[in-house]
Image (cartoon, grey):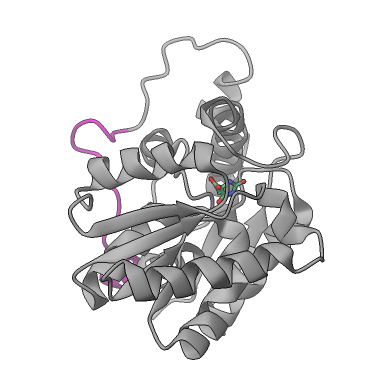
């Protein structure tokens, strides 16, 4: 089996959070996969709402273009809102997975119902919209917010990690669920330890996406180009988006 190269895109501009997710992804992939971990140079330091997602989407599409030009086999959008996922699937030859969708699929394979623990209350509706879109609303008992900003996960105080643990423990004992999903890429490094400590599957989307993407690549299955996810028609788009469409010369 050829060694595949995948790109992990952190859509916010936090280098620290990109490293947290890259470490988790590489610990899951081992020597089977090469992982390019990237984030946009410009954009939003964290994604905590609809506006942030819209701003981050250009950066995501530019990274998809750059990855395609480098010949990567697949991409992961490592933000729990799965921003720009369908647009990225149109642009890329290889499969593109979002960490929210991947986590929901994995949770549904190991539990009949699950809960989600995310960051700010204002992002809860984004998770609910995705549960509806992906058809997992019935399986999700609750979406809890620890009410701390995304970047508090990188501030070194440990307060956010402690809150995540509290909310996971609370969900285990009160939500009648068999699994818990961590609703932020910045929580990727907490899943293994919380699963052992709380004795319930605690699922992080980065690990789930790496594993599912590897399975698709090993199956030789990629995004269908028959229909809505076919490559975008190049009809004279102007401005920064135009370069997303055109492969770099001799790529
Ligand atoms: C994420 N925001 O995974 C989402 C989490 C959230 O910058 N990376 C972000 O709370 O929506």
User: What residue is shown at x 41% (from left), y 65% (from top)?
Assistant: 181
Q: Position of residue 96 (x, y in %)?
A: 40, 51
Q: Quadrant of the N terminus?
A: bottom left
The reply to whether the magenta stretch includes residue 220 is: yes
Q: Position of residue 182 (x, y in %)?
A: 48, 63
Q: Quadrant of residue 124?
A: top left
Decide if residue 38 is on the left or right side of residue 96: right
User: What residue is shown at x 30% (from left), y 69% (from top)?
Assistant: 107
Q: Position of residue 219 (x, y in %)?
A: 26, 70
Is residue 98 among what the camera can see? Answer: no
Decide if residue 129 is on the left or right side of residue 191: left
Q: Quadrant of residue 115?
A: bottom left
User: Of residues 191 and 3, which is closer to you in this image?
Assistant: 191
User: What residue is shown at x 62% (from left), y 59% (from top)?
Assistant: 186
User: Of residues 121 and 153, which is closer to you in this image?
Assistant: 121
Tell me the magenta residue range.
Answer: 214-230
Q: Which residue is most to the front? A: 174
The reply to whether the magenta stretch includes residue 181 is: no
111 vs 233: above or below: below
221 vs 122: above or below: below
Q: Quadrant of residue 244?
A: top right
Decide if residue 231 is on the left or right side of residue 34: left
User: What residue is shown at x 28% (from left), y 35% (from top)?
Assistant: 229
Main secondary structure type of the part rendered in magenta: loop
Give the mark count: 0
212 vs 47: above or below: below
Decide if residue 16 is on the left or right side of residue 198: right
User: Of residues 218 and 160, which is closer to you in this image?
Assistant: 160
Q: Position of residue 109 (x, y in %)?
A: 23, 73
């Amino acid at each position: 089996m050829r060694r595949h190269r995948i790109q992990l895109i952190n859509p916010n501009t936090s280098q620290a959070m990109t490293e947290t997710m890259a470490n988790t992804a590489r610990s899951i992939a081992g020597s089977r996969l090469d992982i390019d971990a990237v984030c946009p140079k410009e954009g939003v330091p964290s994604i905590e709402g609809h506006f942030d997602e819209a701003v981050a989407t250009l950066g995501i599409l530019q990274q998809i273009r750059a990855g395609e030009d480098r010949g990567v086999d697949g991409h992961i959008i490592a933000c729990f809102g799965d921003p720009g996922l369908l647009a990225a699937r149109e642009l890329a030859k290889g499969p593109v997975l979002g960490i929210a969708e991947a986590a929901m699929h994995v949770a549904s394979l190991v539990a009949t119902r699950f809960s989600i623990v995310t960051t700010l209350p204002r992002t809860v509706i984004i998770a609910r919209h995705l549960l509806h879109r992906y058809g997992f609303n019935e399986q999700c008992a609750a979406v809890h917010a620890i009410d701390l900003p995304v970047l508090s996960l990188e501030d070194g105080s440990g307060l956010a990690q402690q809150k995540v643990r509290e909310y996971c423990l609370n969900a285990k004992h009160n939500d009648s669920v068999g699994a818990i999903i961590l609703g932020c890429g910045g929580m990727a490094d907490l899943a293994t330890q919380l699963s052992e400590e709380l004795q319930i599957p605690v699922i992080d989307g980065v690990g789930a996406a790496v594993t599912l993407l590897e399975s698709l690549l090993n199956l030789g299955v990629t995004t269908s180009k028959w229909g809505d996810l076919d490559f975008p028609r190049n009809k004279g788009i102007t401005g920064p988006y135009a370069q997303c469409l055109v492969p770099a010369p001799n790529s």
